[in-house]
Amino acid sequence: MTMTEHGPLVDLRSDTVTRPTEAMRAAMARAEVGDDVFGDDPSINRLEARMADLTGKAAAVLLPTGTQSNLVALLSHCQRGDEYLVGQNYHTYFYEAGGAAVLGSIQPQPMPVQADGTLALDTLAQMIKPDDCHFARSRLIALENTHGGRVMPREFIGRVRQLADQYGLSVHLDGARLFNAAIASGQTVADLAQAADSVSICCSKGLGAPMGSVLVGSAELIKQARRWRKMVGGGMRQAGIIAAAIDHALDHHVDRLADDHANAERLHAELSVLPGIVEATVNTNMVYIELESREKGLALQAALRERGILTAGGQKIRLVTHLDITTDMIDRVVTTVADVLS
């Protein structure tokens, strides 16, 4: 734990900042390893089988990062000149450096994201291209669960599946925080993954592993994904130490995601009543607070940093709870924000 003159560092920028627990480090040290490109790493083989089973899919492949996992999925679904339809604020379009277009010659067709994080189905249907040489070939719909911490409604995902089937498209789900969605909704991960042809699950966010994402799907899709993983530089060797960390997280860090959600609810309840906070919302492990201006948001960020609390800056600030955030830290954040704003 990093200490500051004000106490332990409180890092609310993202749940990507989690650090392996001592128990996770011990599990990593004990891991059996082999050359994963040759298929010889027993820890990775067991993890991939476990994740395929958990999600109700036929196969899985471990990749270093969530961005690479999503990229490999898009490359596996689409060919040059194809397009994927996606929310303009979804991670696969907005936050992944244009990888699908740059590396795969895959055209993104972005569309507005509604307030609840879903896409308007009528708009989605209108943007699917007819089979005409003037247009890119619509091939894939890319969704996200959670989005901004919001759990995607089951009915929405089911209707997207129906639309995809009607037009002969596939569905990829960026499920970076799918375990958060499962805990919050009371559904299983397999329930949440059922309507998608492929799902990317990040293990270095709320689950707390140091790195690694798992892509799940059909046996044929995952076979293609392994080829693309090698091509984009994601083939790993003795990476069983990463698989061991993820296995430990699956054993010990899933149910405790409810603690992160409870801490977020508590943080939201306390911050939302403070003078100077224009609006506050909470979903799963994410709290968003809005101030009167960008300048005031940046000033709050700077003042908090001086007191050992890290946040994003701007008029709208995202605060993310995770396994390294305790209830005492939540109280300290509330007290400090109140002091700064007063």
Image (cartoon, rainbow, N blue to C red):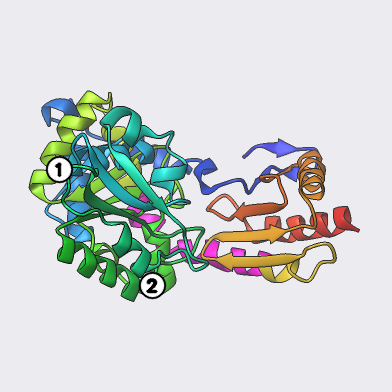
Numbered circles on residues, count? 2
Residue type at mark 1? Ile
Q: Nearer the viewer, residue 102 or 179?
A: 102
What number is the disc on residue 222?
1
Q: Is residue 92 visible?
A: yes
Q: Which residues, given as a range, are shown in magenta?
A: 248-267
Residue 34 visible in the picture: no
State the image quarter where residue 169 is shown: bottom left
- How far across and down, in percent of the image, does residue 160 sit? 28, 66
Rounded to the nearest angstrom, the CA distance separating label 2 from label 1 is 27 Å
> Residue at position x 37%, y 60% from top?
179
Residue at 84% of width from left, 60% of height from top? 338
The x, y position of residue 54, in whole percent, is 22, 59
In this picture, is 247 found above or below 26?
below
Q: Which residue is mark 2?
A: 153
On the rendered structure, is 131 left or right of 153?
left
Question: Which mark is nearer the camera, 2 or 1?
Answer: 2
Residue 302, picture quadrant = top right
The crowd level at tag 2 (other Cα within 10 Å; few <14, some 14-19, many 20+) is some
Label 2 secondary element: loop
Horizontal side of residue 188 vs 290, given as left or right: left
Amino acid beneath label 2: Pro
Disc 1, SS: helix
Q: Which mark is residue 282?
A: none
The mark nearer the N terminus, 2 or 1, is: 2
- Residue 187 part of the magenta segment: no
